[in-house]
Image (spheres, grey):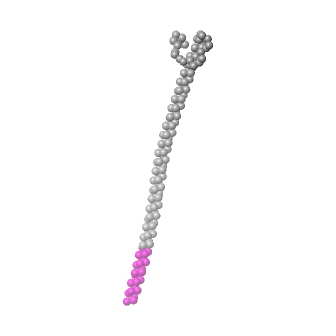
Amino acid sequence: MSFTSLPLTEINHKLPARNIIESQWITLQLTLFAQEQQAKRVSHAIVSSAYRKAEKIIRDAYRYQREQKVEQQQELACLRKNTLEKMEVEWLEQHVKHLQEDENQFRSLVDHAAHHIKNSIEQVLLAW
């Protein structure tokens, strides 16, 4: 370290009780100050790196959450579509079955009415 120009630093330690400050003491204080500054830079770099990594983890988590939400919505839409198609087939089958039952009942009523009318006409003709 060159002593022709000393950096302006604030020494946080109590000065020695003697009138003369030894160069070793100043060198030690400057070394301690330099080490402290280096430690601050390293700790700042570590904290910054951890902060960036935490931000990346959070971004990845949000992205994963969005992807999962989209995937769930797609699965739900597919499930709804399949359920509706299945239910539509069942509803159509039931509807056709009910229509056939109604038609059979109607034919039965028409046949019964026709038979009744035929019997009534026969009775009228026989009574005449």
> In the rendered view, does 51 fall on the left or right side of 115?
right
Tell me where residue 43 appears, x and y as whole percent. Answer: 55, 26
Residue for point 42% across, 81% down: 116
Q: Quadrant of the N terminus?
A: top right
Tell me where residue 19 appears, x and y as whole percent. Answer: 60, 10
Residue for point 37% across, 89% down: 128
Looking at the image, residue 64 lies above or below residue 33: below
Q: Which residues are magenta?
A: 107-128
For the residue pair 36 and 70, the one nearer the viewer reads as 36
> Is residue 126 among the parts visible in the rendering?
yes
For the residue pair 2 and 101, the one nearer the viewer reads as 2
For the residue pair 12 and 86, the one nearer the viewer reads as 12
Tell me where residue 75 appears, x and y as whole percent. Answer: 48, 49
Q: Is residue 97 magenta?
A: no
Residue for point 54% across, 29% down: 47
Res. 102 image quadrant: bottom left
Tell me where residue 44 appears, x and y as whole percent. Answer: 53, 26
Residue for point 47% across, 58% down: 87
Res. 113 image quadrant: bottom left
Residue sitting at the far bottom: 128
Looking at the image, residue 94 lies above or below residue 54: below
Q: Is residue 124 magenta?
A: yes
